[in-house]
Amino acid sequence: VGAAVSIDSFTPGVMGNGIAILMLGGLARFSAAVASVWPGGRLAPKECLFVGLAWIPKATVQAALGAAALDEVTDSGGSAEKRGWAKEILAITVLAIVIAAPLGATAIALSGKKLLTTDREEHTNPI
């Protein structure tokens, strides 16, 4: 993925849009993950928050699919405008990998010690 990205693709507009997309996507992933395991299930509230934090990083998907748009446009002989859009998509993909993976790993490492417990008494519905 990284070899196909040109530094010229990282314009301020692409960077700003990419960061906004990452923030909104991260918030949506966090919310959906927490809502899917919220109490009433088998996890304590703190564990539900940890699940939400653990679901924020998503670099694996970007690494696997990031270059697909550029490959498709290149293979089909797409216009210069479409190649530009595909390069922007790829740049945002790389931005997601560079930002989401380390932030997610840090959030997991720091929050795990505070939010996870081995004390089963905290659960309303123990496993």
Image (cartoon, helix red, strand yellow):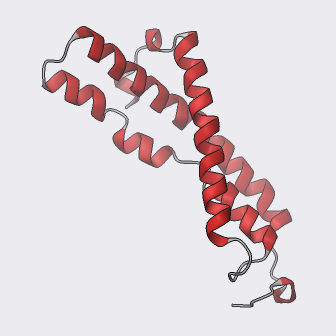
Q: Residue at x 66, y 55 (%)?
A: 31
Q: Quadrant of the N terminus?
A: top left
At a point 19% along the width and 22% down the height, the residue shown is: 74
Task: Using residue 97 as the reference point, say whether residue 43 is left or right of it.
Answer: right
Q: Position of residue 90 (x, y in %)?
A: 40, 27
Q: Dividing the picture into quarters, in which one does residue 124 lie? A: bottom right
The answer to whether residue 37 is visible is yes
Q: Residue furthest left?
A: 76
Tag count in the figure? 0
Is 11 displayed left or right of 106 in the figure? left
Question: Seen in the image, is 78 located left or right of residue 62?
Answer: left
Q: Quadrant of residue 6?
A: top left
**Residue 82 locus on image (x, y percent):** 28, 17
Residue 11 versus residue 89 in the image, above or below? above
Residue at 80% in and 71% down = 45
From what the image shows, is residue 20 above or below residue 105?
above
Looking at the image, which is closer to me, 11 or 97?
11
The residue lying toward the viewer, choosing from 65 and 30, is 30
Residue 116 appears anywhere in the view: no
Residue positioned 61% across, 68% down in the render: 36
- Judge from the rendering whether residue 94 lies leftward or rightward of residue 108; answer left or right: left
Residue 29, horizontal then vertical, whole percent: 59, 52
The foreground one among 108 and 24 is: 24
Out of 107 and 15, give the one closest to the viewer: 15
Tell me residue 44's x, y (percent).
78, 76
Looking at the rendered image, the quarter that the C terminus falls into is bottom right
